[in-house]
Image: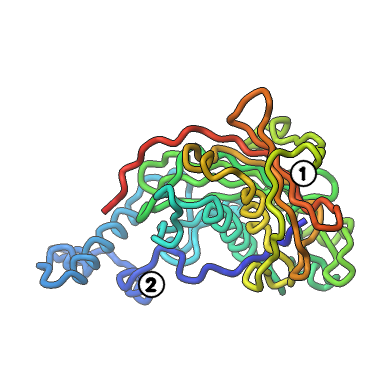
Amino acid sequence: MASIGSTMMLGRESKSLATLRIKSKPFSPPPPGGVSLLQANLRAPSMKGSQTTLNTTVEKQLKLLHDPRDSVHDMVADSFFLGKVEKDSRIFSQNFTIRSYDMGPNHTATVETLMNLLQETALNHLRCMGLLKEGFGSTPEMSARNLIWVLSKVHVAVDHYPTWSDEVRVETWIIPSRRNSLAIEWIISDSWTGQTLTRASSMFVMMNKETRKLSKWPEAVKREIEPQYIDRPPLLDKDSSRLPKLDHTKMEYVRTGLTPRWNDLDINQHVNNVKYVAALLESVPIPFLESHELSAFTVEYRRECAMDDVVQSLTSFCHETIDQCFHLLRSECGHVVARGRTKWRPKQKKNFKA
């Protein structure tokens, strides 16, 4: 299992000098016969490259201010800072810009980047609801009992990968789940076109931070979380995310000697769940990675992984179809750390944004 926590991506939010100026002084309509400060900036001649960037940013902020989608979803909150929540606070959304360091060899955002965006919005959602106490993801009642959330399963479907400078919108909410688990879902879409890029669903369970044992939900924690549930159908088919039992002796590709680095650890001092996904993919043959891209994956987290652990990554192709793989992450002593299934599609040539 893996902790919900990860390094907070400070600066990942789409911000700029213009954004900070708008925050410090709320936007107000221009006086009769006059123009607003934002409109004046748009009309001013661009004498330098930085001014051109500022004007472009301001233009985008104006578009956000008059975006009809806001009225449809009835959003409230500061759209230029943390994110947006609906009036009932049960759906949270946040915009991000894909940076150059978010991209991989395919000239698109990496799977790790997408997973980090999911984590960030889920935590910010809890913070906006007033349910974020000490530690990532812990509610006030959980903190009082030394409890934390750990990710037990995640299922992600990637329809399209964003690329450099794309602006994406991440929406997240909580749906009713089994007795002792929490289900969080996400949609990543293009901020301007609304096109769905990624859909994701996850399952969290509760663990005692000191004993590292799973815990049942205290009634006080249930009372905190239940008002935030949204009763809607799951985004992804749960049956398609079920994983078969895997025999490590029959796996075709093996990568041994994988050891966590210091920067792979989260604030709970064990390997962050995003790093598990990267480790599972370590044993996928490079020629296959060069010709295919990941279209969907399911990961079950079975055991914590710490700094002293040495693990093996194992991959096997499905015999029925070559576009599906099964994966195991095992410790040297034989414990299953995680297992997963991935689905792939042939790469399409992408134009790199200059």
In front of the other: 75 or 31? 75
Q: Amino acid at mark 1?
A: Ser
Q: Secondary structure at mark 2?
A: helix
Mark 2 residue type: Lys
Of circles 2 and 1, the one toward us is: 1
Q: Is residue 87 visible?
A: no
Task: Give the residue at mark 2.
Answer: 23
Q: Is residue 28 left or right of residue 246?
A: left
Location of the C terminus (image quadrant): bottom left
**Corner quadrant of residue 146:** bottom right
Which residue does the image show at 38% across and 72% down from the upper left? 23
Instruction: Write down the residue under mark 1.
Output: 177
Residue situated in front as seen by the camera: 343 or 65 = 343
Mark 1, Cα crowd under 10 Å, few <14 / some 14-19 / many 20+, is few
Residue at 31% x, 60% y: name it. Answer: 61
- Residue 109: % across, % down: 46, 52
